[in-house]
Image (cartoon, rainbow, N blue to C red):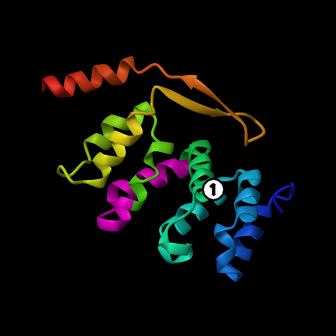
Amino acid sequence: LGHSEAKNATTALIKLADFLPDVAATHDFLNALALQDTEEGAHFLLSVFGQPEKFRNGRPDHGFVETLTRLIIRHPNAKARYLAALVASHDQARVRLASILPGVLQPDDVVPLLEKVVGDNDPLSTGLIQASTGLAVRRKYADDRSSFEMQPQDLGRIRGQMLGIALG
């Protein structure tokens, strides 16, 4: 199904995962969703990500996180949904959602998210710190959806905004 050009291939994959719940975190299923590269697949993986019981040891493996972040980056509506869920979340859900921020964060996201940090121990602040260290260089995925190249990013504007915040 991953290589299918049928319009409903992603929907079929998701229905399969509904029928066989353990399949959603498998390498072959994730690869198929990555090949389909749809917003629907991104939304599905984001919903699965919020359910620790779907994973061995309650945590997704690297392949799941990589596929999820790649799809979030490629689909703006999925990214908007992720960021809204992150901002609205609390406790362990916030820890979980903030953990993938390094793979998703773009310079334009920093200040709006910084304004949503609640206290020193907020997982969002930890996620922002971890994610900000990787902002200077980003992965740009090729059309084949699996290879990428590292490209520098200009952070002059974000530095100016941060300086403005620091100076009050």
- Within the image, what quadrant is residue 166 found in? top left
Question: Tag count in the figure?
Answer: 1
Residue shown at the point (29%, 66%) measured from the top left: 91
Secondary element under disc 1, as helix, strand or loop, is helix
Q: Please state which of residues 120 and 47 is positioned toward the viewer in this rendering.
A: 120
Report if residue 8 is visible in the image: no
Residue shown at the point (84%, 63%) measured from the top left: 1
Tell me the residue that label 1 is attached to: 63
Whether 88 is among the magenta residues is yes
Instruction: Kindly identify the amino acid type of the residue bearing the numbered disc 1.
Output: Gly
Residue 97: horizontal and vertical position, in percent? 42, 57
Residue 43: horizontal and vertical position, in percent? 58, 60
Report if residue 131 is visible in the image: yes
Horizontally, residue 159 falls left or right of residue 62, namely: left
Whether 115 is among the magenta residues is no
Residue shown at the point (54%, 49%) measured from the top left: 77
Placement of 76 over or under 45, stated as above or below:
above
Placement of 88 over or under 162, stated as above or below:
below
Q: Residues within 10 Å of mark 1 (few under 14, many from 20)?
A: some
Please report the bounds of the magenta region as a residue range. Answer: 77-95
